[in-house]
Amino acid sequence: MDRDEVLMAANQPAKLAVIAILPFLLLSYGVSNAGCSTIPDNSTDVLSLLDFKHAITDTTGALNSWNSSVSHCLWKGVNCSLKHPGRVTELSLGGLGLACPISPSIGNLTFLETLNLTSNSLSGELPPLTRFHRLQNLLLAHNSLQGDIPDAITNCSKLNYLDLSGNYLTGEIPRNIDLLTDLSFLYLSVNNLTGMIPPSLKNLSQLEALVLNNNQLTGTIPDGLGQLLNLLGLNLGANNLSGRIPGTLFNRSSPLYYVDLSFNMLGDTLPSDIGDTLPHIQSLYLGYNMFEGNIPASLGNASELTKLDLSSNDFINKLEANDTHGWEFIDTLSNSSSLQELALGQNQFQGAIPNSIGKLRPAFQLLGLGYNDFTGAVPNSIGNITGLTALELRSNNLNGPIDGWVGKLKHLQRLYLSANNFSGSIPSSIGSLSKLQYLHLNENKFEGPIPPSLGN
Ligand SMILES: *[C@@H]1O[C@H](CO)[C@@H](O)[C@H](O)[C@H]1NC(C)=O
Ligand SMILES: *[C@@H]1O[C@H](CO)[C@@H](O)[C@H](O)[C@H]1NC(C)=O
Ligand SMILES: *[C@@H]1O[C@H](CO)[C@@H](O)[C@H](O)[C@H]1NC(C)=O
Ligand SMILES: *[C@@H]1O[C@H](CO)[C@@H](O)[C@H](O)[C@H]1NC(C)=O
Ligand SMILES: *[C@@H]1O[C@H](CO)[C@@H](O)[C@H](O)[C@H]1NC(C)=O
Ligand SMILES: *[C@@H]1O[C@H](CO)[C@@H](O)[C@H](O)[C@H]1NC(C)=O
Ligand SMILES: *[C@@H]1O[C@H](CO)[C@@H](O)[C@H](O)[C@H]1NC(C)=O
Ligand SMILES: *[C@@H]1O[C@H](CO)[C@@H](O)[C@H](O)[C@H]1NC(C)=O
Ligand SMILES: *[C@@H]1O[C@H](CO)[C@@H](O)[C@H](O)[C@H]1NC(C)=O
Ligand SMILES: *[C@@H]1O[C@H](CO)[C@@H](O)[C@H](O)[C@H]1NC(C)=O
Ligand SMILES: *[C@@H]1O[C@H](CO)[C@@H](O)[C@H](O)[C@H]1NC(C)=O
Ligand SMILES: *[C@@H]1O[C@H](CO)[C@@H](O)[C@H](O)[C@H]1NC(C)=O
């Protein structure tokens, strides 16, 4: 199906690896450059660094400072231990265009606490991980690394922040990853990982972010993930996960702010108390799955909800203007909430859009109701949502004129009304929507001339 822009916009976060809301914890490294000048330049760490330099291609000369005129502890991106002079505790060379494989010698930097080679063009396999007993931050994201994540990663027993996202890693997530008991941030998104989500993840009680989206993970969501009481963000989007959302996943006493399960093959009904058990949820992306049944009214209780995507599922038949139960969550949300995006497109909703849609706050930005079976006229109250930037109503059975509301939505950038039964004239007030970029009116019953104001 021709995937519309509104839905794409609503689903953008599902395609990204980032959880922007999570605070990044910078650790105190407790290191300094003191004492480096007394270190013999034949020490293991110098040789490892030189091996690293020789193995890579440094087209921009980023490593020109890596020469014998100064101690290696003063080289760009290098930091050394205070207690153990000359031992390298940090190697941070992000975004420097470094290419080619990472020398295995890097695995000899046994005092490393931070290895950050994010956003280069490094290829080959992960460096040997068996001797990184002090490593707390391992960031190799956004490179071209291949091969498996070795079981030996569990030797990095102090690991707190692991980010290998945006590579070509294959194979399974190590089953015994729960040996990394200090792990707080696990980012493995946008790779080619296969197999199941390891049930042992439930043992990682410190975990705050679990981000595994855009892989080829299969099987069900492990029950035990509900035990991760420190979890703030969960992204399992764009995998091949099936089954239902485990009842325990959202049944928790601690807040979860971000959940993305979109673009999977998950099904069954949503937990009816989802809005009560996730009172602090801000972004909930469940689109492009096979969920069915009703939209739980309890979602109305999630008063911090900003983005809700339920598009392209099999939700049916509940959203009728005369059926207060169906739209109940909208009524509640609209009163108190910070809701900005609501995507309900590509389901099987029927009935009329209620007058109460106008209760959505003016700060509300994106409404996607396309590809359903909504009927009747669009209530003029929709003109109250003055902050709307995108309105997607395409492919329904909506009718009647649009001149009662369209001119009020001054911030509209995208307006999709095609493939309905809208009638009457094309209002000249559309010409006052100065921010409009996309206007789709085709396949309707509009009559009369095209207003000259459209030229504005
Ligand atoms: C390393 O350097 C030290 C001090 O300059 C020297 O005494 C030692 O022999 C050298 N070791 C090797 C293997 O070259
Ligand atoms: C060696 O590194 C220093 C900085 O540490 C730099 O000033 C100097 O230009 C470098 N030498 C060469 C030949 O690149
Ligand atoms: C090395 O450590 C010092 C003190 O902790 C810090 O200020 C400095 O930014 C570090 N250097 C690098 C290249 O990370
Ligand atoms: C890693 O490097 C990237 C790119 O230079 C930087 O944005 C990020 O803050 C670094 N993270 C850590 C933990 O050093
Ligand atoms: C350094 O690493 C290489 C490659 O892993 C290994 O062959 C070598 O023995 C190591 N050297 C030391 C001194 O540990
Ligand atoms: C490192 O990991 C390997 C493979 O998991 C294991 O056999 C080995 O005993 C570990 N070594 C250390 C020093 O922890
Ligand atoms: C990884 O996945 C991408 C996109 O799905 C695919 O194009 C590529 O061939 C895969 N690579 C490997 C090594 O499986
Ligand atoms: C971790 O999880 C596994 C699998 O769910 C379980 O069998 C094991 O007992 C747990 N280990 C610890 C230390 O809790
Ligand atoms: C994942 O799902 C896609 C699309 O349904 C399918 O093409 C692919 O073969 C599946 N991969 C696995 C590993 O099941
Ligand atoms: C959720 O937790 C409550 C209290 O611990 C419990 O009574 C209830 O059965 C749980 N529901 C599910 C679906 O696990
Ligand atoms: C709502 O109206 C439709 C017809 O417009 C009717 O079929 C349906 O039974 C009504 N639902 C309720 C709950 O009244
Ligand atoms: C739309 O806004 C007007 C005031 O601007 C208000 O009187 C009316 O109740 C609103 N409509 C709805 C359906 O909330």
Image (cartoon, helix red, strand yellow):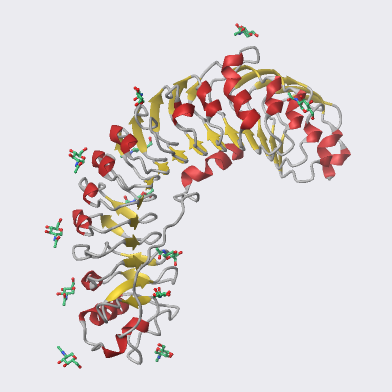
Q: Is residue 310 above or below residue 19?
A: above
Q: With respect to residue 184, does 338 lie above or below? A: above
Q: Quadrant of residue 248?
A: top left
Q: Is residue 92 above or below residue 276?
A: below
Q: Which quadrant is home to the C terminus?
A: top right
Q: Is residue 88 above or below residue 332?
A: below
Q: Work out whether residue 302 can be spotted.
A: yes
Q: Position of residue 385 (x, y in %)?
A: 72, 33
The residue closer to the viewer here, 372 or 320, is 320
Q: Could you tell me residue 398's position as x and y percent?
A: 69, 21
Q: Residue at x 52, y 27 (%)?
A: 299
Q: Nearer the viewer, residue 421 or 181?
A: 181
Q: Is residue 143 left or right of residue 317?
A: left
Residue at 30% of width from left, 79% of height from top? 54
Split into quadrants, the picture shows ligand 2 in the one at bottom left
Q: Is residue 207 left or right of residue 309?
A: left
Residue drawn 42% across the image and 22% down it? 269
Q: Locate residue 381: give its quadrant.
A: top right
